[in-house]
Image: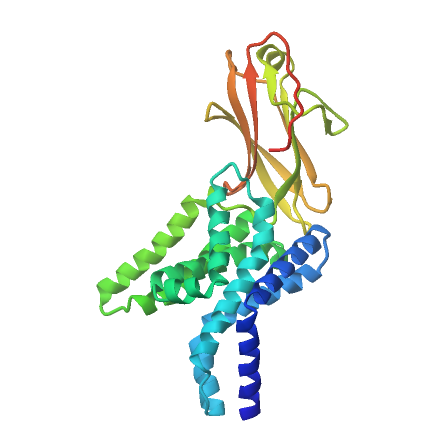
Amino acid sequence: MPNCTLYIQRILELMKRYPGVIALGGFISGVGSFILVDRQQSLATWIATIMLVSWVWLMLENSLNQLITKVFKREIPQPLLRYATQMIHQESLFFVLPFFFITTTWNSGQLVFTGLLGAAALVSITDPLYYKWLAPRRWLFLALHTLTLFAVLLTALPIILHLTTAQSFKLALGIAMLLSFPSLASSFPIRNWRGGLILLGMTAAIGGAGWLLRSWVPPATLWMTEVAISTELQDRTPGGDLDEVSASQVRNSGLYAYTAINAPRGLDERIYHVWQFEGKEVDRIALDIHGGRKEGYRAWTHKQNFPDNPVGRWQVRVLTEDGQVIGVLRFTVTDAGQNTETPSEAK
């Protein structure tokens, strides 16, 4: 047993000497998993499962520590316990970052969520911030803990269980709420029934905030590979992608909103093309997509019914069944007599 303890201490010293190795390992595993998911390979399921199982340690940390103490008559050093928690945070955050960086719609509120993940990842590898600023503030530590678990669940559940994005979001939010309850209870002990009600209210508030802000959360395993706003579509291929189109041409031939969406691992999803004019919704059209094509499942809507005066700013928001934003296509209708066809990058 002394040799085992010495061996663990040496490993711990090496890991502390090179703190970036754990984060780098997490990031590489995340990139590898993303590539494997994109290529429909089942190895990604095992990687995601290992990441999810690692959270069992965090949930049962105190119980496992007591069990080890009872069986081996030795306590696990507190620095080792704290470092194990930090290591799981590092591994988890850097594992999910590649998924969210790819799927984030950067010109939307999703920037906030992915930005928070990035900031949390940096805190997790910066010891002064993690131990001297974050850890003493129990509520802030629990917030990072819950955010990390939520992101891991959003990434892992579709890969492991082949759930749709909507199902994964609901399940991830429910699990995050359930597991945040004991953490909150440890910070705010229940001394009477009022305290219990307050604690339940705080847990419900976390879930309610997560649901109301769901459009700010990127669908971690669903992303667009090609988009276009066009006046024509032939053989499932759109014409030139337009930034601007004339009002006369819109009235004559309408517009196509074309999206190729990657739904890996053979997922079946229902999405929506939501047409908006000057920020107001004018049409919502449901589309069913199926995973399996590396290039993405091709889907489009053809809008012909425009207002009498369609001049202004338009956008087509591509949403999941629960309202998460997959992407946004923007264009402008002008009152010019001729159509302006300007190739643009995918939005």
Q: How many marks?
A: 0
Which residue occupies 46% across, 92% down? Answer: 73
Residue 89, compared with residue 320, is above or below; it is below
Quadrant showing the C terminus = top right
Give the percent coordinates (x, y) of residue 169.
51, 51
Task: Specify whether 64 is left or right of 137.
Answer: right
Give the percent coordinates (x, y) of residue 201.
30, 56
Give the percent coordinates (x, y) of residue 166.
53, 47
Q: Quadrant of residue 306?
A: top right
Comparing 183 with 9, the one in front is 9
Q: Quadrant of residue 146?
A: bottom left
Which residue occupies 70% across, 41% down? Answer: 296
Which residue occupies 72% across, 47% down? Answer: 292
Task: Specify whether 59 is left or right of 206.
Answer: right
Q: How is the image coloured?
A: rainbow
Residue 123, compared with residue 78, is above or below; it is above
- Report the residue that reaches farthest toward the right: 235
Comparing 128 with 64, the one in front is 128
Is residue 306 visible in the rendered structure shown here?
Answer: yes
- Report the residue that reaches farthest toward the front: 17
Residue 105, compared with residue 4, is above or below; it is above
Quadrant showing the N terminus = bottom right
Which residue occupies 27% across, 59% down? Answer: 198
Is residue 181 visible in the rendered structure shown here?
Answer: no
